[in-house]
Amino acid sequence: MTHDIDILIIGSGPAGSTFARHLADGTSATILMVDAGSALGTVTGENIRNLPTPAREAAYSMAQKFPLAAVPADPQADVLQARPGTHLLNPRATGTPTHQGMPAAAMSSNIGGMGVHWTCACPRPGGSERISFIEPALMQSAFETAERYLHVTQQGFPATPLSEGIIAALNQRFASDRSRERLAQPMPLACTPQPDGKPRWSGTDAILGELRDADVRTRRGLEIRPDTLCRQILTQDGEACGALLYHLPTGQLYRVNARVVIVAADALRTPQLLYASGIRPYALGRWLNDQPQVIALIDVDAPSNADAKTSVAADGRDNVSGVTWLPFHEPDFPFHGQLMQMDTSPIAFKQEGQNAGKPVVGLGLFLAKELREEDRIIFEEQTDALGMPRMRLAYDLTPADLAGLDRARAAVDKVGAALGGVANGGEAIILPAGTSLHYQGSHRIGPEDDDTCVASPASRVWGFNNLYLGGNGVIPTATGCNPTLTSVALAVIAADDILRRFFA
C-alpha cells in the first residue's frame, strides 16, 4: 500500500507542530504528521500539567506503555528515574559516573512530544548563545512568530511584592553592566494567564491553534497519525521520495510518497532515523550538547510590604513568586538562571530543614557546555525494541565544563546572599548529565557544507533538495537558555524556505 501526499512530517513535538501549522497556513498542500507514540489526552497536544491529577496520572501511565519505556530496569540497581511521561535512553543507567555517557538522557514518545511535558520557559538567547550566521532581522522575525505560536508572556503569574522583591534584589546584586533586556525579570513563559493566578500551560495544542481540532485538520488537509514509526526515509539522487511507515499496533508496513520530507523526531531519534536511512554525513550525531545543571533551594526574605496571606503558604513555602529569569551574561554570569516557585519546578527538591515562615524558591542554573565533536551518538549494529539502530552516547565534561560547574556553585551562594540565604538542606547539587532534556547539536545547522554540520541555515540537509530537519538538535551554538523557543523559530525559518521553494 502506498499513499501520495505533499508534505510528510516525522515527529509531532514543538518543531514538528510548528512546521505543520506554518505550512498549513501558507499553502493548501496535503500534510501528514506521524508520531510513534499515542495521544495522551483528549485535546491534541495539551500540556499534561493542565490536567486534573487523576487524568494526569493516567496520561503518565499511558506514556509508560510505549515499547521503549516498557523495558524493565534492574530492580537490584540504584537506577536513575526519568521525569514523569518520559523514558531513559538507557533504562538501567545508574548515574555513576555522574556525567560520562549522559546517563540521564531521556525522551518522550507521544503525540506532542516533549511539548506536552515541558515547563514552558521561553527565554531568548543572548551573547554567544546566538546563531551568528543567521541575519539578525530574520531571527528576530522568527522569534516573534515563535512567541506568538507558543503564547509567550511575562505575565503568566501576577506580580506580587514578593516576586518584585526577588527581581529587585537580584538586580541590585547582578546588574553590573547588563543591558536592560538582560536584567533579572519575569521569565517569558509559554502560557495563558488565568483569573485564579495559575496559568494554563502551552503544549503543542497552542502551536497548532485551530488545527488541534480534528475536524479543522480534515478540512485543511492535515492528518496527525499516532502509533506510526518511520523506519526509513526513501531517497534517490538527492531527493527524499517518501518514507516507509510502520503501524505499531498492527505491524503494517507501508510506503508514503511525499514532495517534501521533514524529520523532527528529537535530538536523538532524528539522527537515528537518518542513520537508519543511509543518510550519514560526518557531523550526524556529533557535537551533542547537553546543559550541565546545578540546582539549589534559596530562602527569600519577604519584603515588609508583602501580604503574608498571599505571599507565603501556611507551611512557609512560597506559592506566588512565579518564575524569575536571571539571563545568561558574559563574562560575569555565563549561566541561564531561573528561580521557580515550588509547584512549577520540574525537579522534585528534597529539603531536610527549613526556616519557618520564609518563602523558598528553587534555583536552577544551566551552563553552556564546551562543544566537541567527540560528544556524540554512537549507532550500534544491534537494534532497539522498535527495530531501529541502538544508540549509546559518548559524552563527558571537559576541564572547562568542570570549572564552569565550580563557578555555578559559587553563583548559587551569591544568589542566596542576595535573597536570604541558601536553604538548610537545599545546598547546591550537580544533576547527572542528561537531566536538562535540552539536547542540541546532533543534527546541527551551519553556514557551509564542511563536515561540521548536517544542514543549511534553513535546516535543509546538505546534498538533498527537499529533506529538512527540525528540533533542538539543529541548534549549533553552546547555550545555557531553554532551547524550545529557538528550535521553534528555526522551524519557522525552514518552513518559510519550503513555502518559497516548493509552494510559491
Image (cartoon, rainbow, N blue to C red):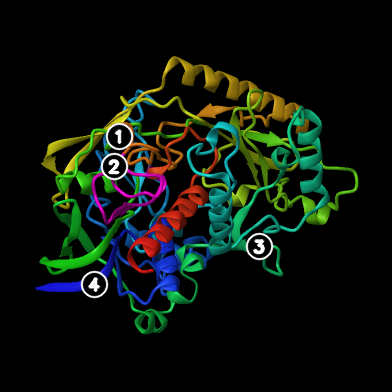
Residue under pointer 2: 89
Q: CA distance from mark 1 to mark 4?
A: 41 Å
Q: Position of residue 75 (x, y in %)?
A: 27, 39
Q: Which residue is mark 3?
A: 198
The verdict on residue 459 being magenta is yes
**For residue 323: magenta?**
no
Q: Position of residue 497 (x, y in %)?
A: 40, 57
Q: Nearer the viewer, mark 2 or mark 4?
A: 4
| Residue type marked 2 | Leu
- The residue nearer to you, when weighing 232 against 253, is 232
Question: Which residue type does callout 4 highlight?
Answer: Ile
Q: Is residue 111 in view from this perspective?
A: yes
Instruction: Choose top left, top right, bottom left or bottom right for residue 144.
Output: bottom right
Mark 3 or 4 closer to N-term? Answer: 4
How far separated are the C-alphas under marks 1 and 3? 36 Å
Q: In the rendered structure, are the residues bearing label 1 and label 2 in contact, judged by CB atoms less than 8 Å apart?
A: yes
Rendered position, 196 above or below 434: below
Q: Residues within 10 Å of mark 3 (few under 14, many from 20)?
A: some
Residue stretch in magenta: 454-473
Mark 2 surroundings within 10 Å by alpha-carbon count, few (fewer than 14), some (14 through 19), many (20 or more): many
Circle 4 sits in a helix, a strand or a loop, which is it?
strand
In the image, which is nearer the foreground, mark 1 or mark 4?
4
Which kind of residue does numbered mark 1 sit on? Ala
Residue wearing tag 4: 5
In the image, residue 130 sits, relative to residue 374, either above or below, namely: below
Q: Which mark is residue 93?
A: 1
**CA separation in Å, label 2 and label 4:** 32 Å
Foreground mark, 3 or 4, reads: 4
Q: Is residue 121 visible?
A: no
* Amino acid type shown at disc 3: Lys
